[in-house]
Amino acid sequence: MKKILILGGGFAGVDAATHLRKLNYDVTLVSNRDYFYIYPTSIWIPTHEIGFKDTCIDLNELQKAHGFNLIIDGVNKISKENNSVTLQSGKIINDYDYLIIAIGASKMKPKGVENTFSICGAPEQSLAIRDALDDLVKKGSGKIAMGFGGNPKDTSAVRGGPGFELLFNVHNMLKKKGIRDKFELTFFAPMAEPGKRMGPNALKMMATMFSKLKIKQHFGKKITHFEKDGVVFEDESKLDADLVMFIPAGDGHEIIKESDLSTNDAGFIKTDDYSCVLNEDGSLSNIYAIGDVASLEGYDWRAKQGHVAEVMAKNAAHNIHQREQNKTNFKGYNEHLNILCVMDTGNGAAFVYRDEKKAFMLPMPIFGHWLKKAWGVYCRNTKLGKIPRIPGM
């Protein structure tokens, strides 16, 4: 039985392990934490709508459900030449037939970023945002700024959606408490039209929502640095804030930048459409890179999302199996590139979709909020194999 080593316990890594176990491979998953974190539902932790544990699935439960081997440890070094992985504990693994890298991305580090919180950072950051919000609510007033940044070396590494969602949910929470008028909410971003990748109609609808909810906008100015009490821009203007939530753009993982793997300018692993890392002569290697760690090629509006990572994971499992059967019916991710999300507002949602042919945002009333809540339950139970996965999802 061929051995497959998977690095990373997120959407890409867990799905790859699940699919490969169904194909009866000997799979070992390495994760630096002992739980799978459902990032899309973490937007409700700061507003107390759900608890931290509600976003976590114990990896030991996933191991029992699917039968893969599990190592809780960080990755310290990856060597393509030596066909080896060194873990933070010092353990060296070099007896695998295939390696799947799914360790995600690092974050860009603008000056003073330690003065901000991030809903897309370490899971514990959601609790820190919650506590900071609680302090402002107790105070009874305050200025809250939320936004995201970009990576000029890789436009696919932007993740702004959770920032929009969190601010809308905070607005809704403050409104329920009857103190919304005591708070100034601002959304900021260095690009002139944040959210443009969702399409022109979505961009107009977002502007309407900001206006309706009396959320200020601060767009089109480069961020120079963050201070304890706000955001400073290239024209030396400052956005004052008691709480700043900022989602830095993704950047190549430090482990990858220090490895002998081929990367793009931003430090993401180069692969072919089938997620395989190619050898110098163009032949297939035994390494696959999936999810945020990989360079995502394609349309200008492309974005790294969980469902794209899951497509990569399923395809990688399929493509490895094809190779083991001496077949070449490989599957690529490019034809599945799209933007797809339910953008939650706390009292409703909007369905966002874009591909190469169409782009739209469909408003959804309170039903949309409960639809996303239902997706969280669906995600947990499908990962654990308790309910079947809906085809195409």
Image (tube, grey):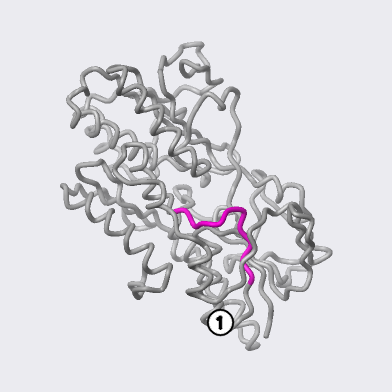
**Residue 307 sits in quarter:** bottom left
User: Is 168 situated left or right of 382 in this image?
Assistant: left
Is residue 34 within the magenta segment? yes
Is residue 232 within the magenta segment? no
Give the magenta range: 28-37
The N terminus, quarter of image: bottom right
Element on which disc 1 rests: loop
Residue drawn at x 57%, y 43% as measured from the top left: 154
Neighbours of disc 1 within 10 Å: few (<14), some (14-19), many (20+): few
Q: Position of residue 122 (x, y in %)?
A: 53, 42
Task: Name the residue that disc number 1 marks.
Answer: 329
Disc 1 marks a residue whose amino acid type is: Asn
Residue drawn at x 47%, y 74% as measured from the top left: 65
Q: Nearer the viewer, residue 232 or 198?
A: 232
* Residue at the bottom extreme of this rendering: 325
* Residue at the top extreme of this rendering: 236
The C terminus, quarter of image: bottom left
Q: Position of residue 13 (x, y in %)?
A: 56, 63
Instruction: Name the dominant secondary structure of the magenta segment.
Output: strand
Q: Nearer the viewer, residue 95 or 153?
A: 95
User: Is 179 situated left or right of 289 in this image?
Assistant: left
Q: Position of residue 200 (x, y in %)?
A: 31, 42
Picture layout, residue 178 above or below residue 87: above
Q: Position of residue 157 (x, y in %)?
A: 53, 45
Residue drawn at x 28%, y 45% as measured from the top left: 344
